[in-house]
Structures are given as structure tokens and as C-alpha cells.
Amino acid sequence: QVRLVESGGGLVQAGGSLRLSCAASGSIFRINTWDWYRQAPGKQRELVASFTSGGSTNYANSVKGRFTISRDNAKNTVYLQMNSLKPEDTADYYCHASLKRDYLTPLSDYWGQGTQVTVSS
């Protein structure tokens, strides 16, 4: 069984910083892509940042220059460093991984349980 567990959310004032972590555990052969999504109240879930299968990164326009996605392959962990936070960044943040549990199985999608980020003005 594979689990993704996020941590690092909380309450921060506008202009502040938070670092989210997402650790994957269980039987993992290879993680193909990592993503961070967020969902604000009453809004659809949106992609915030991602590592592609080739290792490049992509960011939503709304977070470019402020958020940085990074990873530690040895720990099967992905991070989201969030700087210059704004009230509109308030949301539940979810990590997502597309991975193979072993050489023969196809890619499968896994989601974390989410961590809440609240930015006060």
C-alpha cells in the first residue's frame, strides 16, 4: 500500500512563508511525476506546481516567482516552498504522485490527505 502524507500547513500573515512536505511511503518502484494542487473554498482544484517525468518543473502563473517545488528522491519526498504568501493563496493543498509500485505494474495515481494553508491579510 502506498501512502502520501503532507505536512507543513498552517496560518501565516501575508508576505510570510511556509514549506509544505509530502512523503510517499510503501512499495514504490519509481515516481514518475509529482504535483502540488490546491483547492480554495467554493473553487475547483487547481494545479500549483509539478515535476514532469523528465524532471522539469511547471508552475501556475499565479505562483511563479513565489513558490518553488523540490524533491528528495532518496526520501521519496516532495516539497513546496511558498514565499510572499497572499490571502488568495489560502486553500487546502494536496500532493499527487504518479508512480509504479513495481516494474510490471502500470502507473497509478495517489493523493495525500491535504494540508490547510491560511494566509491572513
Image: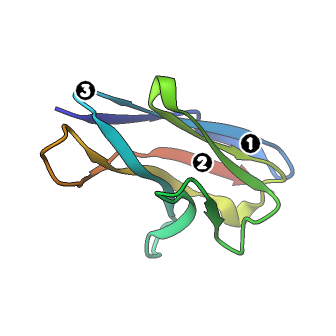
Q: Secondary structure at mark 1?
A: strand
Q: Secondary structure at mark 2?
A: strand
| Residue 26 - label | 3
Q: Position of residue 62 (x, y in %)?
A: 72, 72
Q: How many other residues sit within 10 Å of disc 2, few (<14), some (14-19) or many (≥20)?
A: many
| Residue 37 - label | none
Closer mark to the observer between disc 1 and disc 3: 3
91 or 2: which is nearer to us?
Answer: 2
Q: Quadrant of the N terminus?
A: top left
Q: State the colouring used for the structure image.
A: rainbow
Look at 60% across and 48% down and name the residue there: 117
The answer to whether any part of residue 19 appears in the image is yes
* Mark 1 to mark 2 CA distance (whole Å): 8 Å
Q: Secondary structure at mark 3?
A: loop
Look at 62% across and 58% down and name the residue there: 90
Q: Position of residue 64 (x, y in %)?
A: 76, 66
| Residue 117 - label | 2
Q: Position of residue 103 (x, y in %)?
A: 19, 40
Look at 44% across and 69% down and name the residue there: 45
Q: Amino acid at mark 2?
A: Val
| Residue 12 - label | 1
Q: Position of residue 35 (x, y in %)?
A: 48, 55
Q: Amino acid at mark 3?
A: Gly
- Pointers 1 and 2 in contact (C-beta within 8 Å): yes
